[in-house]
Amino acid sequence: MTYSFSVEKLLFVTVTAILVSAFAPSGEANAPASPTRHELVRARLRMADNPAGVEAFSKTAHVFLKRQCSFCHGDTQAPLFALDDVSKSYAAALPLVNFNDIPKSKLVVRAMNGHCGLDFCETDGKEIIAAIQEWAKSENIEARVRTKEIPMPQLSLTQYTAIQWDLNELEPKQAGLEDAKIQVEALAFSEDSILFRRPRIIAGRNSIYVKDLVIELNGEPIQKGKYKGVEKIVTPGAPPPVLSVDKIIIPAQANLTIRLSLGQLGVSQALAACNNVEMFQTKVYPVMADRECFFCHGGGPKNYAGEAMARRMYDMGGTIQQLCVASMQRAQPSTPLKSPIVWYALGNEAGHPRMIPYVDDIQPEWIDWIKSIVWKK
């Protein structure tokens, strides 16, 4: 095997490596991070599924990368996204692109930060951003709705902080949500970790349909599957239900930003009616009465007054139809046993008594009803 290094290039690469190592701030990588093995595998699988993406890449970003970056990333410095071989370059470049927030892509950042010591990587970013935007048109990019990106607030070690966004500031903007909000609670779980819990939507004057929630930190999704099963209609005027009982713990970092990303979020025209009121009345309601859920939450066959806090969070008064709708908003058909009405009743949430001693009391009765729920936007 032969190598065709010029003396000048070899000297440049050696000197640059020494300088970057010597002057880089501790803990900060100035050179592009190499994709992990798993990222490369996913990129190659995606490449096989989407030849149109490879073709678009060859006419857009690859042109820029070959011109600006091949001196290093064309044969000597990983990741090798500026090779003559378009397919291999595509596989290396794909993990370095965030199609949902293109300006934050590693390829864009590294094209602007001067890490190579030459003007090749000191551009204004406009050309590579435009190239990736054109490339993205041929990728299977999931359209999502996002809140504003805000700095992570100072978190307490003892008390949860509600991080809240106005839904009239979504990107792209959604009509009819001017007086609605979405939030997630956060806690400094330890000196070096953060815990997130209890996402909620506070509806304004309109019912809101929500599906598939993701927390994004510094523009990157964390634990994407955790709230993927979230889907429901949140009605106005009601206490805001917990969308999921799952919690997320991540390592803490300095200078974090946070936003929420949703598969779908918008005003719902569907009527807030119980999908299966007969099943609810015969299978769910009797267990609620037998286990005295109404004693705290109000209503029921004995028409309990309830306790203020419990009734504010989950008002079980009113008609069977109204209770069914309120219970639906606390059900999760994708994972029935993780539904808030089940999770809280089994005592799995701190502070809530275990009102139902055994899961057998509600399985399959409650589970069958939860599985029958179908949300219509």
Image (tube, rainbow, N blue to C red):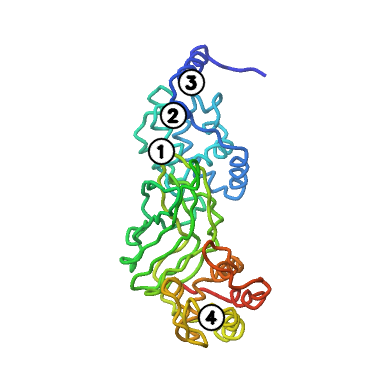
Left or right: 53, with 266 as reference point:
right
Count of numbered tags:
4
Tell which residue pokes out farthest to the top in this image.
Answer: 7
At label 3, which amino acid type do we have? Answer: Ser
Vertical comparison of 271 with 194: above or below: below
Closest to the observer: 54 or 256?
A: 256
Element class at badge 4: loop
The dot on residue 128 is 1
Whether tag 1 and tag 2 are in contact, CB under 8 A, the answer is: yes
Distance from Cα at disc 4 to Cα at disc 2: 59 Å
Whether tag 4 and tag 2 are in contact, CB under 8 A, the answer is: no
Picture coordinates of residue 160, whole percent (x, y): 43, 54
Distance from Cα at disc 4 to Cα at disc 1: 50 Å
Element class at badge 1: helix
Instruction: Look at mark 4 in the image and give the residue it sits on.
Output: 275
Vertical comparison of 133 with 120: above or below: below
Marks 3, 2: nearer the viewer:
3
Q: Point out the tag, 3 or 2, that comes first from the N-terminus.
A: 3
**Which quadrant of the rendered structure holds the N terminus?**
top right
Q: Point out the tag, 1 or 2, that comes first from the N-terminus.
A: 2
The dot on residue 93 is none
Closest to the observer: 52 or 197?
A: 197
Tell which residue pokes out farthest to the left in this image.
Answer: 178
Whether tag 4 and tag 1 are in contact, CB under 8 A, the answer is: no
Residue 319 visible here: yes
Task: Tell me which residue sits at (46%, 30%) in the image.
Answer: 28
Task: Tell me which residue sits at (52%, 53%) in the image.
Answer: 140
